[in-house]
Amino acid sequence: MNLWFTERETPSVALSAEVERVLDHHQTAFQDLSVLQTKPWGKLLILDGAVMVTDLDEMGYHEMIAHVPLLSHPHPEKVLVIGGGDGGTVREVVKHAQVREVVLCELDPDVVAASRTYFPQLSSGLDDPRVRIVHEDGAAFVRAQAGAFDVILVDSTDPVGPGKVLFEASFYASVKEALKADGMVVAQSESPWYTPEIVTGLVAAMRTVFPKVGLYTSQVPTYPGGLWTFTIGSLGPDPRQCDRRRAAQLEHLRYYTPALHEAAFVLPNFVQELVQKAGGNL
Amino acid sequence: MNLWFTERETPSVALSAEVERVLDHHQTAFQDLSVLQTKPWGKLLILDGAVMVTDLDEMGYHEMIAHVPLLSHPHPEKVLVIGGGDGGTVREVVKHAQVREVVLCELDPDVVAASRTYFPQLSSGLDDPRVRIVHEDGAAFVRAQAGAFDVILVDSTDPVGPGKVLFEASFYASVKEALKADGMVVAQSESPWYTPEIVTGLVAAMRTVFPKVGLYTSQVPTYPGGLWTFTIGSLGPDPRQCDRRRAAQLEHLRYYTPALHEAAFVLPNFVQELVQKAGGNL
């Protein structure tokens, strides 16, 4: 029937994909949720009109948000994932034998339910016995922790609606308190081509509380611009250093490699300039 | 008037940009040519419906196609650019003091004329006294050379229409004959997400004649998938090695850095597997 999904990636850029079937579309308590079967990308999860995950490229996002901090932290035993209700980040975290406990703090239970129904490969880690799922506001949850976590992964939506607070300096002050003395945090920080102010805002927000802050990239073609960034803050370990012995034990990696871990911190000149101006120091 | 340009990037993916003004649209002797003033990307050159260059991201393409071979070749004195009538690649080539002669072989004189009219920053290198422009078929031109060039840059359109022959093994046999004994060739090789068969086809085509063939990437958000590849073949020098002393002499680099030169050869796991299967050996 020539059905197309279109996301307005910026006010003047749109990305569209041909749709085979609408599998789900409903209003949750928090947002508009859809699952589509598309021709180019396989299954597609959409929240409030924005692409969240697709079968095609979700590994570019999930492998890089998880393995870069977990392989540079020396003993990632307790991990918190904020957002990420689709389970893709948790699936990568539980590949690590050192991890003893994962808390997934996802505000919206419908996201978890939709992933369990339509994305069995994404949600496969959610039943791991080390995983505990809580449906709470991420910022409030973090404030109630103290020195609890080795690594915190902020797998958020865009900085509008419920995800907005997760890009603010006050949130990262709470994150620091929730980490152990050598803890690390990673947050997705959008596109340097289309929203450089989000990249610089997040780097600056983290630098108010973390002594080491850097940026690394991954490829997610269904996200605006295709080049995606992660901002990483550390209270101790150098996030660029991969523990190659532990990396060799990870299975089913389609995107991440130890060499790519290090190369992902090497930025195009204009991105490096953005990061340095905002206070990034890796 | 809410005017949009849309490119069908694959049969089931479309990228659209809001348009402020149509500056040019005519049929040349070879193809359909348009120049648009867009809101998100600045000026946009379109050939046969496909995005060729935009003000926003042309540096991601042109700096990487030119400086990687020119800074890994020990003495790039004579350079051939096939296609690339917009002049962006030539602009980067003439930044190198070692270059004594550049031949730009662009089939379609209208592309050069449109760039001179609408893209002064792109075409600024075309009047350099070392540059000679010939309007001939690239494949035929190359067959008439013998041991003439240090570096050949294949800055082609997509492998349809006039650009198709530039992706075939017989063309790379001619390219090898047109190079000196330690020569290098680079060709743009499209998206590993959407057209992996073009990546593997070009790697395999080059490997029939070049002892060293590798792949490196750049970011071009207005191209399909945003992650773009270049296939590089060498008769001698290691393309991954940047001459940092010469690199430090280049001015106005917005994208390229010596560290990025080396990092650009570090590929996501699924891309590395594609390249190795096709015979890539860097």
Image (spheres, coloured by chain):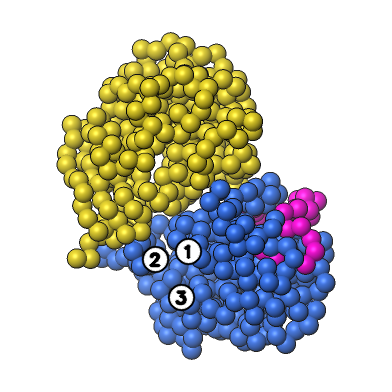
Chain colours: A blue, B yellow
Residue A127 place in picture, x, y as percent: 67, 75
Task: Name the chain letter of the residue that bears numbered label 3.
Answer: A
Q: Is residue B184 left or right of residue A256?
A: left
Residue A239 figure quarter: bottom right
Residue type highlighted by circle 1? Thr
Point out the tag, 1 or 2, that comes first from the N-terminus: 2
For this view, does B245 lie left or right of residue A13?
right
Mark 3, residue position? A47
Q: CA distance from mark 1 to mark 2?
A: 9 Å
Camera-side residue of A113 and A246: A246
Q: Position of residue B140 (x, y in %)?
A: 32, 18
Q: Are marks 2 and 3 in contact (CB under 8 Å)?
A: no
Determine whether label 1 and label 2 are within 8 Å by CB.
Answer: yes
Give the amino acid at mark 3. Answer: Leu
Disc 2 designates what residue? A10
3 or 1: tag closer to the N-terminus = 3
Mark nearer the N terminus (2 vs 3) = 2
Real-space CA distance between mark 2 and mark 3, rounded to the nearest whole angstrom: 16 Å
Residue A149 sits in which quadrant? bottom right
The magenta segment is A231-257
Residue A16 in view here: no
* Mark 2 belongs to chain: A
